[in-house]
Amino acid sequence: MEETKFRGKCEGNWMYGSYAKTGVGLHYIVPQNLISNQLLGYVVDKKSVGQYTGLKDKHSKEIFEGDSDGFYIVKKGEFPVRCHETCKIIDRAYGWYLDPIDKSTEPSSWEIPLNDFYVNRLDAFDKNIYDNPELLEN
């Protein structure tokens, strides 16, 4: 079974665990090993919350939504599936995918599914869009 884990920033530090939000708009990361009768967690910036993809990069670092290798950004959602012979969109898929930062040159501007095949061929996912907002400037 895939581990469901999130991360979010609290006062400049990454917190890891389960994600919860309240009716008054607060967003929490609750440590997963915490046993308590109360909701004890860290209030995090909702824009920094990202889910664990279930994959690790070639350096065994967990890959989260919003992570980047400098060329792609990890996202979750609907993305196009292309025919490599015709370059046309032939279907749509939903799930984890790699969104290219530079969209100026095909086929390197195409979204690709996030899976072990691609992860093992890319550099380390040592950046993210929260600590490196310049990744979103293209």
Image (tube, rainbow, N blue to C red):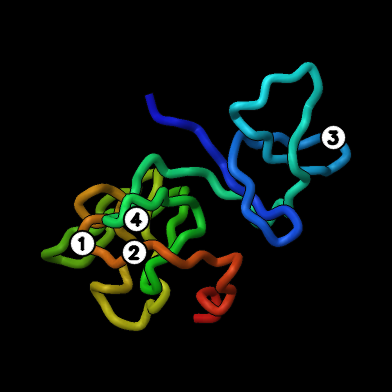
Q: CA distance from mark 1 to mark 3?
A: 42 Å
Name the residue that disc number 1 marks. 121
| Residue reaching furthest to the left | 85
Q: Tag 4 or tag 3, which sits nearer the N-term?
A: 3
Residue kind at label 3, given as amino acid type: Gly
50 over 40 or under it: above or below: below
14 over 19 or under it: above or below: below
The spot of residue 134 in percent (x, y) is 55, 79
Q: Nearer the viewer, mark 3 or mark 4?
A: 3
| Residue reaching furthest to the right | 24
Q: Nearer the viewer, mark 2 or mark 4?
A: 2
Asked if residue 26 lies left or right of residue 87, the reply is right
The spot of residue 36 in percent (x, y) is 74, 19
Q: CA distance from mark 2 to mark 1?
A: 9 Å
Q: Tag 2 or tag 3, which sits nearer the N-term?
A: 3
| Residue reaching furthest to the top | 37
Query: What residue sits 39% from the left and 40% below the top?
Result: 54
Asked if residue 33 lies left or right of residue 27, the reply is left
Residue kind at label 4, given as amino acid type: Pro
Decide which of 136, 82 is in the foreground and name it.
136
Q: CA distance from mark 3 to mark 4?
A: 35 Å
Name the residue that disc number 4 marks. 80
Residue at disc 4, secondary structure: strand
Which numbered marker is on residue 23?
A: 3
Residue kind at label 2, given as amino acid type: Ala
Decide which of 2, 101 is in the foreground and name it.
2
Name the residue that disc number 2 marks. 124
Q: Nearer the viewer, mark 3 or mark 2?
A: 2
Residue kind at label 1, given as amino acid type: Arg
Q: Quadrant of residue 129?
A: bottom right
Q: CA distance from mark 2 to mark 4?
A: 25 Å
